[in-house]
Image (tube, helix red, strand yellow):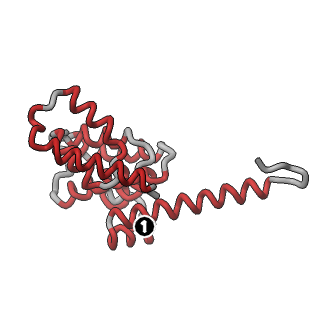
Amino acid sequence: MLTPTEYRLSQKLTHSLDLIEPCASYLTIENKNYIQSKCIELNTPESFYKLFKLLRLSPDDAIVYLLSIRDNNAAAYTIYKFYSDGKNGNRLSENSKFSSFRPSKIFEYTQIMSKMQSTPFSLSSTLVKSLILNQGKCPTDLYHEIEQKGYNGFNTYVIRKKNKEALIEKKRILDSLTVGDTIV
């Protein structure tokens, strides 16, 4: 869940991208790297798409950038959305000029996301494997959330899953306590 401060920060970053857009062709590599480093707090897939367009990032560079942002629901969903858009546009094939659009590379990225120990990236990995690569099953409730609400549905599902995991962890800790233990 986004705090009001995080939301305002993301809105300011998105607004900054709009302001920079007219002079994007004059950005140096250092400028682009600085912008990327500051945009890890973006909170919508549309903002990430805007960033990639502004910086003229290739799909390969965009995916690597998104993979570097841990526990950002929007970054995780943007990876799924990227591949969903690619599939709908018939751009995913082993002959693609972008390695990130080759099914073998997509599978490699899903493996990386699965190992990240990050709920949003794990769910994104499941979505990509099941809906893009047709390998495995996607939880029905996650699929329905995304079909109905897009990113907002994904975000809600992630928050619900994290809350459930936290409750299970608390219960496990409480069950392991014995009389006389102190809770800090």
Q: Whole-percent x and y of residue 157? A: 45, 64
Camera-side residue: 21 or 141? 21
Q: Whole-percent x and y of residue 92? A: 21, 51
Which residue is denoted by mark 1 in the rendering? 142
At x 41% / y 61%, what residue is drawn? Answer: 155
92 in relation to 143, above or below: above
Q: Quadrant of residue 149?
A: bottom left
Left/right of residue 5 with respect to residue 50 in the rendered view: right
133 in relation to 67, above or below: below
Left/right of residue 73 with respect to residue 105 in the rendered view: right
Secondary structure of the residue carrying numbered label 1:
helix
Q: Whole-percent x and y of residue 161? A: 52, 61
Q: Whole-percent x and y of residue 119? A: 49, 53
At x 20% / y 49%, what residue is drawn? Answer: 50
Work out which residue is located at the far right of the displayed protein and give it.
Answer: 180
Q: Quadrant of residue 153?
A: bottom left
At x 22% / y 26%, what residue is drawn? Answer: 30
Mark 1 neighbour density, 10 Å: few (under 14) some (14–19) many (20 or more): some
Q: Tell me the kind of residue under disc 1.
A: Leu
At x 44% / y 65%, what residue is drawn? Answer: 156
Q: Quadrant of residue 86?
A: bottom left
